[in-house]
Amino acid sequence: MEHKIKVAVNGYGVIGKRVADAVEAQEDMELVGVSDVTADYRVASAVAKGIPVYASTDEARQQMRAAGYPLVGGLSDLLGKVDVVVDCTPAGIGAANVDLYRSLGVKSVFQGGEKHSLTGHSFVAHANYKSTLGRDTTRVVSCNTTATVRTLTALQDAELLSKARGVLVRRATDPWESDHSGIMNTVVPEGRIPSHQGPDAQSVVPNLDVVTMAAKGAHTQNHLHFWTVELTRAAEAEEVLAALKAMPRIAFVKRSDGVVAVNSTVELMQDLGRPRGDMYEVAIWEDILTVQGNELFWTYTIDNQAIVTPENIDAIRALAGTVEDGAESIRRTDRALGVRADFTATD
Amino acid sequence: MEHKIKVAVNGYGVIGKRVADAVEAQEDMELVGVSDVTADYRVASAVAKGIPVYASTDEARQQMRAAGYPLVGGLSDLLGKVDVVVDCTPAGIGAANVDLYRSLGVKSVFQGGEKHSLTGHSFVAHANYKSTLGRDTTRVVSCNTTATVRTLTALQDAELLSKARGVLVRRATDPWESDHSGIMNTVVPEGRIPSHQGPDAQSVVPNLDVVTMAAKGAHTQNHLHFWTVELTRAAEAEEVLAALKAMPRIAFVKRSDGVVAVNSTVELMQDLGRPRGDMYEVAIWEDILTVQGNELFWTYTIDNQAIVTPENIDAIRALAGTVEDGAESIRRTDRALGVRADFTATD
């Protein structure tokens, strides 16, 4: 039995709680604990599940004590026990933590809300696991960028990608914040072209010729992407499908199966028994995808809350250096999480 | 004083009531009456405004009599008094009317819900007014197609258009149907690529190289379009803006003026005193439009209920043949409706 990677999660929010569960699901990792700044229902759920809880601030420590939680200690105590910390604090907060992690010799994974310059390295497992080995920190890119890199590198691997132009219809806000954040009965275009996701994808794969435009829709679940891709040559749809099927964490859905919108995939994930209804895969509509000569058009939906979960797990392994082969790490992660290539096949 | 074109509107719904008001606003047209199949609040509003009302069916005749409306007669009576009828009945119904109109020698304008093959001619004023002269019928294309043709022919006129790929985020349903039709908290991609708007634009301008993809958003007002355009050559943004400014019925909006989303333009139209808050223009974000080499990226919003109103007016004139110059017809229409090139300038 190899040494288990000891992992901390700092920030038990939308990403943190999912990463914590995913760490627990890995045979080669141990979730030592999670740390947070509140004592609200989210942290209460961690306590209820028996996850060791730490306080990131003095105020949180007092709140957790008042709530009667079995508080183990402070963030520094937690960091003293781990190999890798996954920083899932809100965007911008992580930047203040990097020096703390470095000073304690703890390797760190940040999220897409932070700037690339914070870590100097941005991560999508299939694209650049190898260049993460030996580093002390990396940044898992955002949900939209993760999907963009997965799908476009699938085409790149098959030497089919010339350039890609995408339109991203984003969810307005996450469900847990719907009581105080969000939009209603409108669509809000992003204020600049390109939107940040294109350049962000290039922080992972510098030679990607990609431009993105984006808008916020009046819904709270999932993003929907449309892409116009110029291929290196005329191709058949079958070649494109084969390239996509060779890529992990992409799954096909079909309108003919009744999967007709983003809410359909949300329902399907719940029916499949996924924790929190999470979808780790990019769900591409196989029966909408169209190739005309050397142009490819497609649309897919992604679960903005869950898609980066497996990437975080691989980033932990890459930083820890316990698995040198990215493909092997992806296999381990995906087996533990039940990631699928087809949601409706009986595999 | 020239002879006024006598006009009937068949179907007093979303399009019909707007066309009726727009006909009344033209100095060279007379609204002889409107005909409908119901006696509900929409028809009541026509009665209240003093518009002569006709019944399209025996059932409607009874309902209108029961409601105490000053019913003038049946649809055939109305058609006997006019030069042109604008058919604004629901999609598919119009197809059953074309023979009636022809048999009575009344020229007819249909809407985008009907097939191109019904009339053999599809209309956008700037693009093909001339080819409408001498015809007995035409079809004003849908809101999305109208916007697509206006903007792309602006580039074509300036010899800048090579090809265009668009993503259309559509409103879910019209406000008046929000009680029984619509979607909530989701986005629904159209089931095929290309969506129908691209081929439909080619029914007006056959040499347009255009592909569209579309999705329904969870909102009831306005569509939002994103376009990736390949130009014939590298250009500056100023050249593109100049080409757009030379085209009627396109107006610029700016985020720096606080116009940040489709709801902003809805509010602005109301503040400008537009009837029903109608926006006849394509509202392009001047400060989001971006040119990179020979690629142009832009986003605009359109009022799906109102944008075809001026096109219907021009179609009436083209069929009547009273004005041979399309540009002159557009000037008359736009002056009467208060169409603007800039919503915030004091012109």
Image (cartoon, coloured by chain):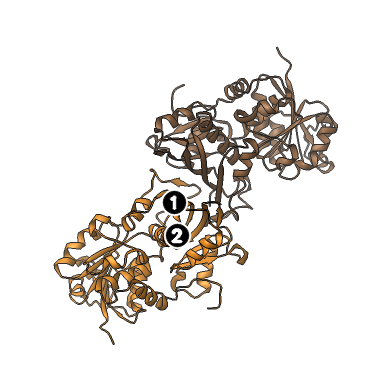
Chain colours: A brown, B orange
**Percent coordinates x, y for residue B37 in the rendering:** 26, 66
Few, some or many C-alpha atoms within 10 Å of disc 2 (few <14, some 14-19, many ≥20)?
Answer: many
Where residue B52 is drawn, which disc sits there? none
Q: Which chain is mark 1 on?
A: B
Q: Residue at x 48, y 64 (%)?
A: B244
Q: At numbered mark 2, what does the secondary structure look like: helix, strand or loop? A: helix
Gap in angstroms between the C-alphas marked 1 and 2:
10 Å
**A159 relative to B323 in the view: left or right:** right
Few, some or many C-alpha atoms within 10 Å of disc 1 (few <14, some 14-19, many ≥20)?
Answer: many
**B105 relative to A105 in the view: left or right:** left
Q: Residue at x 63, y 48 (%)?
A: A177
Q: Which chain is mark 2 on?
A: B
Which callout, 1 or 2, points to the residue nearer the camera? 2
> Which residue lies under the disc numbered 2?
B155
Residue A218 visible at all: yes
Q: Are marks 1 and 2 in contact (CB under 8 Å)?
A: yes
**B108 relative to B270 in the view: left or right:** left
Residue B218 visible at all: no
Q: Amino acid under label 2?
A: Leu
Judging depth in this view, the residue of A342 and B200 nearest the camera is B200
**Percent coordinates x, y for residue B185 in the rendering:** 51, 48
Q: Residue at x 20, y 77 (%)?
A: B81
**Percent coordinates x, y for residue A103 in the rendering:** 85, 33
> Which residue lies under the disc numbered 1?
B164
